[in-house]
Image: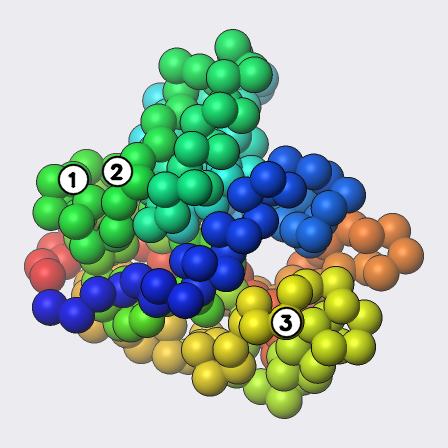
Amino acid sequence: MSSTVDPKDVENLSVFKNDWWNENGQIIGLHLYAPFRTKFVRNGLANAGVQMQNAVLPLEGIKIVDVGCGGGILTERLARIGAQVTGIDASADLINIAKEHAKLDPNITERVNYIQTTVEDFSQKERESYDAVVASEVLEHVANAQLFLKKCVEILKPGGSIFITTENRTVASWLLVIVAAEYIFKKIPLGTHEWNKFITPHEVQHILDGYGCRTRLIHGFKINPLSKQWSWSSCTATFYGLHAIKQKEASI
């Protein structure tokens, strides 16, 4: 079995370890994106029939694995609304940063667990044991997208939800995410993204179909450059989210 890990990408992202939780630093984009990504997961689970009886902690009792969690920006947000979240990442540096930052908030300490591992190793030990898998801004960094998605599905309980956010492989995404963000405005360090690793919504849906997951939603995302707020968009040409549900009869 080949690996899902691209060592170069792990190294590139690990460089941000000391700046990960600086909300005005090099990865400000992930901080701005986090509230919208959290809403995407919460709403998706509600639409899938998950009962949310605690208004303060709506995801209470829900087991989520955040695959490629980095330093834990999304992991912590999901824990703050009640989820029991395991964050996994191939980068030891980023997992250490995530562990240290989680200690700063005693309200989430019992609901967050971080493990430095790969999705293929994790799936062997945790087969069909999570209610939801989140892979947010990760798919464009892995070495083998099909294997990565297969292993994510293996972690899911039948009836569980998988949430993907990533970039489409279009001329628009190349111009915006790479040419503009990396080369012209230098919002992201050069080499953070490779356009040929971007993946279309249709490709993701097709792969998940093959592993017994039925897609419930594909929607575009956009950011308002003035308000710096993310919102839904009818256009999936650049950023998009996909929510699929593992069918009860699925076998991998």
Q: Quadrant of residue 230?
A: bottom right
Horizontal relation, residue 141 to residue 173: left or right: left
Horizontal relation, residue 150 to residue 217: left or right: left
Location of residue 125 in the rendering, given as x and y in whole percent from the top left corner: 12, 40
Work out whether mark 2 precedes mark 3 in sequence or the reverse, and give the earlier one: 2
Q: Which residue: 44% across, 58% down? A: 11
Regarding mark 3 in the picture, which secondary structure is present there? loop
Q: Quadrant of residue 93?
A: top left
61 vs 136, nearest the viewer: 136
Location of residue 143 in the rendering, given as x and y in whole percent from the top left corner: 32, 71
Report the mark closest to the observer, 3 or 1.
3
Work out whether mark 3 precedes mark 1 in sequence or the reverse, and give the earlier one: 1
Cα distance in 3D space between marks 2 and 1: 8 Å
Residue 225, compared with residue 177, is above or below; it is above
Horizontal relation, residue 186 to residue 167: left or right: right
Q: Are marks 2 and 1 in contact (CB under 8 Å)?
A: yes
Quarter of the figure with the C terminus: bottom left
Report the mark closest to the observer, 2 or 1.
1
Mark identifier at residue 190: 3
Label 1: which residue?
Answer: 126
Q: Amino acid at mark 3?
A: Leu
28 vs 53, nearest the viewer: 28
Cα distance in 3D space between marks 3 and 1: 36 Å
Cα distance in 3D space between marks 2 and 3: 35 Å
Q: Which residue: 56% across, 67% down? A: 192
